[in-house]
Amino acid sequence: MPKVSFIIPVYNAEKCVSKCLESIISLSFKDWEVIIVDDGSKDSSAEICDHYAEKDSRIKVFHKCNGGVSSARNLGLSEVSGEYVTFVDSDDFVNEDYLSFFSDENVNEDVIFSSYEIINAKEQNKIPFGVVLNGKKEVVDFVSKYLYTKHIMPPWGKMFKYSIVHDLRFDESLRRGEDTKFSLMSLNKCESLRSVGDSIYYYDLPVSESKYRMNFQEATSHMKSIFEAYEATAFRNESFADGLFHIFMNSATAEIQYHPISFFFNETVRKCAEFVGKGSIKVRLTYIWYNNIVRNSISNFLREKKQTLRNL
């Protein structure tokens, strides 16, 4: 049984997947397996992945019809044979020492956090390193404090004991926030934790978030699903709740702009705003509606008029 199973969902990643796989092959710690799930790629990704599998028996490739990143990760979870499982996106990569801490036989925590760097962006790690915690309360306090950070919300940059997450799956009905929901459920089961600074995950920040645009109904249903998962945990962090509220309201900006009445009287929106708890719901919603929608609409209108005048 390998120490670590990497799960890599791949979809039309012919330009980056080789760099991702080469970074894993180059790891100083060699006791691992890679589970690649080709999610119906239309480019040469499948052939590239198959080529790596032919060269290295630790690499396995599974091909499936396109069903989204969650279905790909779920297939990967069903094929894990390692003691630990970790996720890597096909456009990201890791440093040579990403798993070197496993050389210490005393490392046995339920979850292990790595450091990370965002490619082409300046963002510092938010959690302290060299931390080892044993006990549910200590883990809850630590995760709660850093909940609204990239250390906690995505599935990457952390290693879970497979025995902790073997019965969990990504919510395939969500197309945004499914990773946060999975992380919440997984971390809520952990009773020990370690953070390692020498282990670095390199994250390629998406240039555009247009794929996350939603209609109002979809945005509120997504928000409700993640808030319910959050409320089911022992974690509490106001910034996390506030951030999720803004993320999903921003996703539905276009529709809210033209249907403000639905926004103001939607029960999910009202509940989430109340959960955030900053002032009265009416004041809170009015502020968000103005700040994120009306102001943006005015700015866009002025920008278009300015461009029109330049073209005259």
Image (cartoon, rainbow, N blue to C red):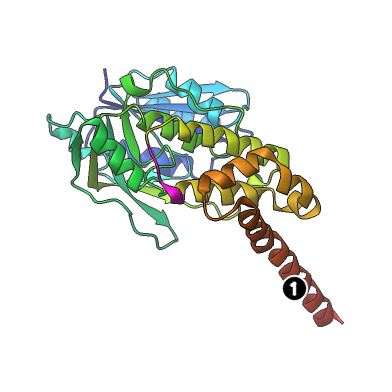
Pick the residue in front: 152 or 271: 271
Q: Amino acid under label 1?
A: Arg
Quarter of the picture holding the C terminus = bottom right
**Residue 34: where, in percent of width, then height?**
38, 28
- The magenta stretch spans residue 238: yes
Compared across the picture, whether 98 is left or right of 274 comes to: left
Judge from the rendering whether residue 268 lies leftward or rightward of residue 61; answer left or right.
right
For residue 196, side relative to residue 204 (left or right)? left
In the rendered image, is residue 51 in sight?
A: yes
Residue 201 coordinates in the image, percent (x, y): 35, 46
Quarter-wise, where is residue 60 in the image?
top left
Residue 100: x percent and y percent? 20, 39
Q: Nearer the viewer, residue 121 or 51?
A: 121
Task: Decide if residue 48 is in sight here.
Answer: no
In x, y percent, where is residue 305? Answer: 81, 75
The residue pinned by badge 1 equals 303
Q: Nearer the viewer, residue 72 or 46?
A: 72
Q: Label 1's element?
A: helix
Q: Quadrant of residue 185?
A: top left
Q: Which residues are magenta?
A: 235-239
User: In the displayed structure, would residue 82 be above or below residue 182?
Assistant: above
- Name which residue lies at 69% across and 48% down: 252
